[in-house]
Image (cartoon, grey):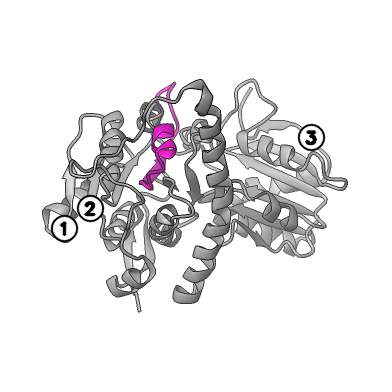
């Protein structure tokens, strides 16, 4: 069985990647992801894995190198944050189009400007439509588990897509938490040897990433979309197998005290645990509150979400990113669109919270629920706690 340790979450993510016996790490450090890059480098330098660490000059180069290594059949990991992820944006859809199961560890951080190094989700949200599977971790244990799961999901022949694991910068990355680290033997049993579909090799010449003429481009995009939509079946299978082997359950949408809830918060990432405490306090006050935590952002789990909201009258959706000029935050827009044709659906309100690391406390979640339940916010959005 795994060993319970106290470990910084960023370090733990690198340790989880090492348990997956990666072949190549190509990472450019950027706060608050730097500890991931540094520890991956240390792991390789110490000879703990038979792997190469590629020193690159930018995030653009990091993902380009990752694509090259993965295309040769090497199990590859990278990591980034904030502006670094934006710098990778040119390359992100190429990785998914080439069906290369790279795993990327993302320490979510606000993007400039103004310059800000603290957490929100404004880095990952613009990358929503690049064709990557996207997990959101709530705590250090989930970061470790999802990192290992990401390799298994992405490398499945029915998927063959890159996967990113999102962990809130500082709020998770720099926290020391109790984590059960699986044994190497356990991970080896869960994660088989990577056998790629096709590889670049001078003795067996193939072409990858070639020109897509108008006659085939649309078909290629449709195929990529089908792959990521269909991956949800594999993700659920992998999560079920993980539960059977390790005893920790994962669901695309995880409910907390929602069975008889009238109003439910919706969160992604580390604020779910704070929201849980708020729900417990609201229950003591006689408010039928619940919580829905989205663990799978792409592909969006439409059917799971619709089942999860049965009986709920009001949804208070929280976003940690702004869709400038849009109808609300990205998560809110996604959920409202998903429920648009439902004959019976809850009222949906949107709170944009925690931008640039702004603190959101238990009392804030309590107030959000009470305001939403009392009809004090129309089906629109509000920058919660923002002056002016």
Decide if residue 30 is in sight here.
no
Horizontally, is 283 left or right of 100 in the view? right
Q: Secondary structure at mark 3?
A: loop
Q: What SS does tag 2 mark?
A: loop
Residue 367 x %, y %? 70, 45
> Mark 2, mark 3: which one is toward the viewer?
2
- Name the residue: 57% across, 51% down: 230
Q: Are marks 1 and 2 in contact (CB under 8 Å)?
A: yes
Marks 1 and 2, Cα distance to the nearest angstrom? 7 Å
Pointers 3 and 1 in contact (C-beta within 8 Å): no
Q: Quadrant of residue 348?
A: top right
Relative depth, front residue between 58 and 160? 160
Mark 3 vs mark 1, CA separation in Å: 54 Å
Residue 112 is labelled as none
Q: Is residue 293 above or below residue 67?
A: below
In the rendering, which numbered label is found on residue 23?
A: 2
Question: Which quarter of the rendering shows the N terminus?
Answer: bottom left
Residue 383 highlighted magenta (yes or no): no
Badge 3 or badge 1: first in the primary sequence: 1
Q: Can the viewer see residue 237 in this picture?
A: yes
Residue found at the very far left of the displayed protein: 46
Q: Would you name the residue on which mark 3 appears?
A: 379
Give neighbour class at mark 1: few <14, some 14-19, many 20+ (Cα, 10 Å).
some
Q: Quadrant of residue 179?
A: bottom left
183 and 358: which is toward the camera: 183
What residue is disc 1 on?
Answer: 50
Q: What is the magenta range?
A: 92-116
Residues 268 and 354: in front is 268
């Amino acid at each position: 069985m795994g060993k319970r340790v106290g470990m910084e979450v960023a370090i733990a993510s690198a340790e989880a990647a090492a348990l997956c016996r990666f072949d190549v790490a190509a990472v450019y450090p950027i706060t608050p992801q730097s500890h991931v890059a540094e520890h991956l480098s240390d792991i390789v330098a110490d000879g703990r894995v038979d792997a190469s660490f590629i020193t690159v000059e930018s995030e653009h180069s990091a993902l380009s190198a990752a694509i090259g290594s993965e295309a040769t059949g090497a199990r590859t990991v990278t990591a980034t944050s904030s502006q670094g992820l934006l710098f990778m944006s040119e390359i992100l859809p190429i990785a998914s189009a080439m069906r290369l199961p790279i795993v990327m560890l993302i320490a979510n951080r606000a993007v400039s400007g103004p310059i800000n190094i603290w957490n929100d989700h404004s880095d990952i949200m613009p990358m929503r439509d690049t064709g990557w599977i996207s997990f959101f971790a709530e705590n250090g244990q989930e970061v470790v588990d999802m990192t290992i799961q990401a390799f298994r999901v992405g490398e499945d022949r029915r998927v063959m897509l890159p996967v990113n694991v999102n962990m809130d910068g500082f709020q998770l990355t720099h926290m020391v938490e109790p984590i059960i680290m699986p044994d190497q033997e356990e991970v080896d049993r869960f994660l088989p040897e990577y056998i790629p579909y096709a590889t670049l090799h001078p003795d067996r010449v193939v072409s990858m990433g070639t020109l897509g003429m108008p006659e085939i481009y649309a078909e290629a995009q449709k195929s990529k979309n089908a792959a990521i939509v269909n991956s949800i079946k594999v993700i659920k299978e992998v999560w079920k197998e993980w539960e059977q082997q390790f005893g920790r359950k994962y669901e695309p949408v995880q409910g907390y005290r929602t069975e008889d809830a009238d109003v439910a918060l919706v969160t992604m990432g580390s604020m779910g645990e704070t929201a849980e405490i708020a729900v417990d306090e609201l229950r003591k006050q006689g408010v039928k509150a619940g919580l829905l935590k989205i663990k799978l952002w792409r592909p969006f789990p439409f059917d799971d979400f619709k089942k999860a909201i049965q009986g709920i009258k009001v949804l208070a959706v929280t976003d940690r990113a702004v869709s400038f000029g849009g109808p609300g935050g990205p998560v809110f827009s996604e959920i409202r669109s998903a429920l648009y044709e439902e004959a019976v659906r809850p009222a949906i309100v949107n709170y944009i919270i925690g931008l640039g690391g702004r603190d959101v406390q238990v009392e804030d979640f309590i107030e959000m629920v009470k305001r939403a339940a009392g009809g004090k916010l129309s089906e629109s959005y509000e920058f919660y706690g923002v002056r002016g």
